Image: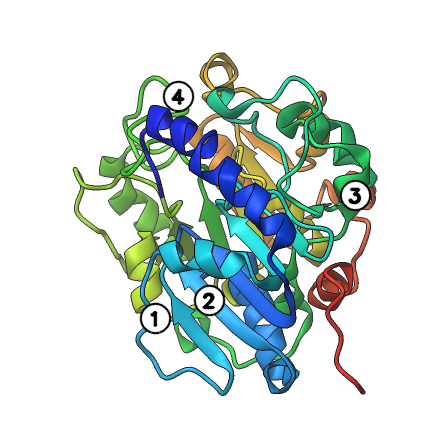
Amino acid sequence: MIKNELTKYILTNTIFRLLSVLNKVIPKDDKTILLYTNMGFRDNIKAIYDYLIENEYNSTYKILISSNEKITERLPLNVHYINTLNGVIDYLRAGHVFYAFGRIPIYPSKNQYVVQMWHGTPFKAPDKRQLQTVSRKSYYTSMLISSDYFKEVVKRAQGVKDENIVICGQPRTDIMFRQFEKYPELSGYKKVVIWMPTFRKSKTLGYADIKEIESFTPIFHTSDYINLNEWLKKSNILLIIKLHPMEDISDFESMNLSNLFLLSHSEFISKKWNLYKLIAQCDAMITDYSSVFYDFMLLDRPIAFTVDDIEGYKEGRGFAVENPDYLTAGYKIKNKLQFYGFLKDLLNNMDLYADVRRKVNMIVNTYNDGQQCKRTLKIANIYIEE
């Protein structure tokens, strides 16, 4: 990933412009699929890959994984790992290209299907440094959005044209609709809750979404976690705090207590957990401004939103949608008392926001069938004989 904005701008408008011209004339292999990611082999990219392998698409297609993180395990037949530089080269011949993190700034040819899946549905405002104010030619054949509600949002944020926007949910959510082996660490509790605070301070990009950062999470300081754990233990609740992959936790020690798991991205990877398998096993979610709540709505389970720093967030990054308060259909938590109140209601199986949450889910998620991977491959014109 190119971090320097000036370098990125120069390369995009020189070398990659030339490559866009070459891409028009270089023949494409309709049986080659390129999966490109500059933030690890995970999320929607990994979901599409798993679906391809499970359904034996690799018997018909050559699959190239271009990732900034090297894949060392043995790969199936017709699957190859390449670095991101070679990914640029192989893009010129690939008939089908998928992104979830980053992109190669080369315009697709007429014979290519280039699909941008992104890694979340818009809720937070886009990075102001990347904002597009006018429609422009797209680097994608198709940009996926989860419902028609977000069409104008992505047009404002990305400058993308109507013909490049396609409604399709997140492929990563399909696993939530399937049967799979449960994680034994989650058994034996009355309730399991996942807390997913939004990104606040990046360890790689060097900026924050809010001005003052005193803890990994809203509501509680790190010093409060021991008392929180004692309450959770008495209530037999497991609370898993899953931190954002880009979150900077270098100034803090990891803290795994009996009923409170604080997981950095690296610790999560070391457990070999799948995030959406984990989410599917949770009875409720707590978040703040992370768009993951759109995905969790597919499960029709209680959600709580910590909003104690919402004014600071509005002044910082802000929101992409015009009615964030309505879309966040759940408990609004501003202090510890309300936090514990949500957990008490959960123990008593009280779901006070079920009706409005279901209405919002119909607005933000067009499809609720666990068939997003299949739908995405169809958008990219990828088929195998049945």
Label 1 residue SS: loop
Q: Residue at x 49, y 61 (%)?
A: 90
Q: Amino acid at mark 4?
A: Ile
Q: Residues within 10 Å of mark 3 (few under 14, many from 20)?
A: some
Mark linked to residue 210 = 4
**In the figure, residue 2 lies in which quadrant?**
top left
Marks 4/1: CA–CA distance: 34 Å
Q: Nearer the viewer, mark 1 or mark 2?
A: 2
Q: Amino acid at mark 2?
A: Ile
Quarter containing the C terminus: bottom right
Q: Residues within 10 Å of mark 4 (few under 14, many from 20)?
A: some
Label 2 residue SS: strand
Mark linked to residue 71 = 1
Residue 71: x %, y % from top left: 34, 70
Give yes or no for contact between labels 4 and 1 (Cβ–Cβ under 8 Å): no
User: 155 or 176: which is nearer to us?
Assistant: 155
Label 4 residue SS: loop
Residue under label 2, please give it: 65
